[in-house]
């Protein structure tokens, strides 16, 4: 009975982890779409960013949910990693990881830690200044400031390189995480091959677009 309860608890944790991952994947698609507008039109990017920055539903409902989702996803990742390690206290005599799983699946915790560090940099670059601008300094809204602030962050080649490396690691994380999330919530059925391809394309296209955005603003402004 106790073993069954532990198994059920483990399954629930994996499902919760997967649901938070799917939620964050949806956010990534929205986020890269908004940022890509900065390549196409400065004015439209400013308008879209201003709407996102001052819309009450986004700021006071969706933003806290997003923050909770990020924290929950990483905490559950560490919990499940520790749980899996505890379940195998004795290391295998010989283990060839590359023969049994991809690099992405074997190093999710590493790519996750890099992404977590990147989020710290991202918050430092964009979220903290935004909070200071609106709530601490109480500066009057300026709908034309967003493009300039974005471009300014990518003047520094070191910062741009850090962003690009983080996006590449994000791609590796998504390569395994996308499919794993769908499998954990039972979406891998007769459409599994199609969904796997969608996940692999997402893991390449979305981080790739983020890299393109960073490099575009670094070399063109």
Image: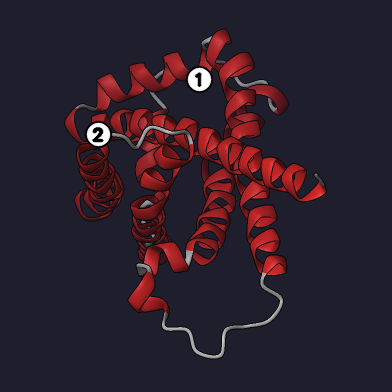
Q: Residue furthest front?
A: 1
- Image depth: mark 1 or mark 2 in front: 2
Q: Is residue 221 visible?
A: no
Q: Residue furthest bottom?
A: 93
42 relative to 4 in the view: left or right: left
- Residue 206 is situated, as x and y percent measured from the top left of the image, at 28, 43
Q: Residue at x 68, y 81 (%)?
A: 90
Label located before the other in sequence (1 or 2): 1
Q: Residue at x 64, y 37 (%)?
A: 12
Colour scheme in use: secondary structure
Q: Residue furthest right?
A: 2
Pick the front one: 99 or 107? 99
In the displayed structure, 23 sits above or below 201; it is above
Residue carrying label 1: 53
149 relative to 66 in the view: left or right: left
- Residue 102 is situated, as x and y percent measured from the top left of the image, at 35, 67
Q: Is residue 121 visible?
A: yes
Q: Which image quarter: residue 132?
A: top right
Circle number at residue 209: none
Residue carrying label 2: 190
Q: Residue at x 25, y 28 (%)?
A: 42
In the displayed structure, 62 sits above or below 121; it is above
Pick the front one: 143 or 25? 25
Element carrying mark 1: helix
How far is the residue under mark 1 from the one under mark 2?
41 Å
196 relative to 60 in the view: left or right: left
Pick the front one: 92 or 199? 92
> Is the residue marked by circle 1 packed among few (<14), some (14-19), or many (20+) residues within 10 Å?
some
In the displayed structure, 30 sits above or below 171; it is above
């Amino acid at each position: 009975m106790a073993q069954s309860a532990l198994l059920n608890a483990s399954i629930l944790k994996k499902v919760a982890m997967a649901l938070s991952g799917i939620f964050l994947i949806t956010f990534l698609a929205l986020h890269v779409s908004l940022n890509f507008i900065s390549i196409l039109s400065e004015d439209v990017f400013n308008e879209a960013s201003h709407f996102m920055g001052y819309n009450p539903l986004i700021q006071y409902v969706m933003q806290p949910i997003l923050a909770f989702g990020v924290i929950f996803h990483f905490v559950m990742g560490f919990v499940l990693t520790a749980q899996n390690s505890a379940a195998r206290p004795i290391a295998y005599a010989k283990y060839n990881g590359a023969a049994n799983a991809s690099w992405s699946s074997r190093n999710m915790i590493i790519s996750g830690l890099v992404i977590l560090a990147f989020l710290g940099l991202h918050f430092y670059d964009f979220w903290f200044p935004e909070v200071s601008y609106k709530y601490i300094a109480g500066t009057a809204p300026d709908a034309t400031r967003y493009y300039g602030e974005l471009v300014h962050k990518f003047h520094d080649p070191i910062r741009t390189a850090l962003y690009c490396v983080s996006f590449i690691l994000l791609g590796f994380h998504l390569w395994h995480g996308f499919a794993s999330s769908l499998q954990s919530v039972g979406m891998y059925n007769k459409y599994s091959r199609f969904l796997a391809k969608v996940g692999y394309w997402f893991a390449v296209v979305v981080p790739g677009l983020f890299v393109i955005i960073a490099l575009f603003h670094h070399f063109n402004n």
